[in-house]
Amino acid sequence: MKIAVIGGTGLIGSQVVKNLNASGYEAVPHSSSTGLDLLSGKGLPEALAGHDVVVNVTDSPTFDEASPAFFQTTMDNLLRAAESAGVGHAVVLSIVGAELVPDLVYYRAKVLQEDILKAGPVPYSIVRATQFFEFMDAVLSWTSDDKTVRLPATRIQPMASADVAQAVAEVCVSAPLRGTRNVAGPEVFTLDELGRITLAARGDQRTVVTDNNAGVYAAASSDVLIATGDAVIATTTYRDWLAR
């Protein structure tokens, strides 16, 4: 089985490639650094020729109003090329609860990406993951100063990127779901609690202040970012990941 991994040099994609190749499949990474331009479609026919599966883990370069156009164009280009190449399975990585946070334009853009895939000509699978452990540093930086970090009490169920990549790899080598698989971490935290755990583990003396209007995740209310009962639960805990 030959698998083209679009975005295959990034955080998730590089691990997907490694996992697939270690399992005996032929996975090839493609990204702007390898000469593929998903926005223009340049390099797509060559990247997909002779491949059975294409997985797209490419992300929008911005989280703002430009993100819907990015996903519209790149998915149109990808599906057109995949159909022409006879690819039998298209896989996309998305976000648990994306349709439940309409105030975030990036989440609306991810829903648009899913909808384009569902309506397209290629049998598909969608893997929806919760937030990555690796993004916590960025989250802390958004609303911080030298003394405090302001975070909302939004409930999240984060997971390690390695577990996300494994879930994506497993779906790639299975029959198309023609639906969605949710994957999530083994623990639920409030974001402010997770911030305190992170700072304490790193010896950071700043104080986390609970502010339900602070940062991007303030737009997510209730349990919208928590995986439902049918989700696949990963095994890596946040504290174990921090200790590595």
Image (spheres, rainbow, N blue to C red):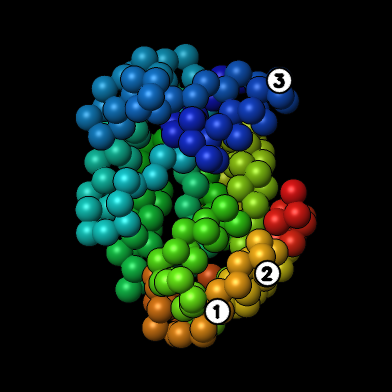
- Three-letter code for the amino acid on which mark 2 is drawn: Ala
* Mark toward the start of the polypeptide (2 vs 1): 2
* Mark 2 to mark 3 CA distance (whole Å): 41 Å
Residue 7 in which image quadrant: top left
Residue 24: numbered disc: 3
Taking depth in this image into account, of 198 and 102 the one nearest to the observer is 198
Q: Residue at x 48, y 36 (%)?
A: 10
* Mark 2 to mark 1 CA distance (whole Å): 10 Å
> Which tag is nearer the camera, tag 2 or tag 3?
2
Quick check: 146 left or right of 76?
A: right
Q: Callout 1: helix, strand or loop? A: strand
Taking depth in this image into account, of 195 and 37 the one nearest to the observer is 195
Q: Residue at x 22, y 30 (%)?
A: 40
What residue does disc 1 label? 208
Is residue 114 visible in the rendered structure shown here? Answer: yes
* Mark 3 to mark 1 CA distance (whole Å): 46 Å
- Three-letter code for the amino acid on which mark 1 is drawn: Val
* Vertical position of residue 97 compared to residue 147: above or below: above
Residue 121: numbered disc: none
Q: Residue at x 74, y 49 (%)?
A: 244
Quadrant in which the N terminus appears = top right
Residue 200: numbered disc: 2
Q: Residues within 10 Å of mark 2 (few under 14, many from 20)?
A: few
* Vertical position of residue 16 compared to residue 125: above or below: above
* Mark toward the start of the polypeptide (2 vs 3): 3
- Does the CB distance between marks 3 and 1 fall below 8 Å? no
